[in-house]
Image (cartoon, helix red, strand yellow):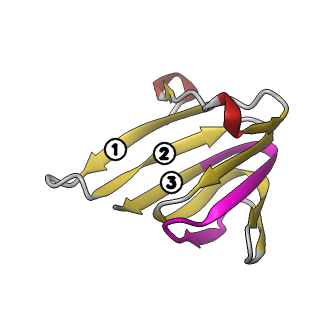
Amino acid sequence: MADDELEADPLDPSQIVSGEPVVTGKVLWESPDGRQIRGIWQITPGVVTDTEANELFVVVSGRATIEVEGGPVLEVGPGDACVLREGDRTQWTVHETLRKAYHISL
């Protein structure tokens, strides 16, 4: 999927710790009840915070360090799979523009 096919998904300014990260993405599939979502998500370098949903993702390209509050520090890059739990508070340090394919369960 080319960058120009992704849609802007602006961050809440309160999530930005440093840099000027830009988020884009595209939902590729959503279950009829809206509780399962699959798509592509991309973020440019910077540091951001987030509160996670139940998510499984695979990094397609780029690199980041994800610090889970009270949990592990994850170094992710191309081909890495990661599971985040609903309510996890995270800080993402994006070293190289990161693109991931994800599945979220709400």
Q: Quadrant for the C terminus, please.
A: bottom left
Mark 1 highlights which residue? 28
Amino acid under disc 2: Ile
Residue 87 screen position, x and y as percent: 53, 65
Q: Is residue 30 above or below residue 13?
A: below
Amino acid residing under circle 1: Leu
Q: Which residue is mark 3?
A: 101
> 90 or 14: nearer the eye?
14
- Secondary element at image label 1: strand
- The picture places residue 3, in percent across and down from the top left corner, at 57, 28
Contact? badges 2 and 1 (CB < 8 Å): yes
Which portion, as a residue range, is magenta?
Answer: 78-99
Cα–Cα span, label 3 and label 2? 5 Å
Q: CA distance from mark 2 to mark 1?
A: 7 Å
Q: Earlier in the sequence, mark 3 or mark 1?
A: 1
Q: Are marks 3 and 1 in contact (CB under 8 Å)?
A: no
Q: Label 3 vs label 1: CA separation?
A: 10 Å
Residue shown at the point (20%, 55%) measured from the top left? 31
- Residue type, label 3: Ala
Callout 2 secondary element: strand
From this view, report whether residue 30 is shown above or below residue 11. below
- Can you identify the residue that label 2 sits on? 40
41 vs 18, nearest the viewer: 18
For the residues labelled 3 and 2, say whether their Cβ atoms are less than 8 Å apart: yes
Residue 23: percent from left, percent from top: 61, 33
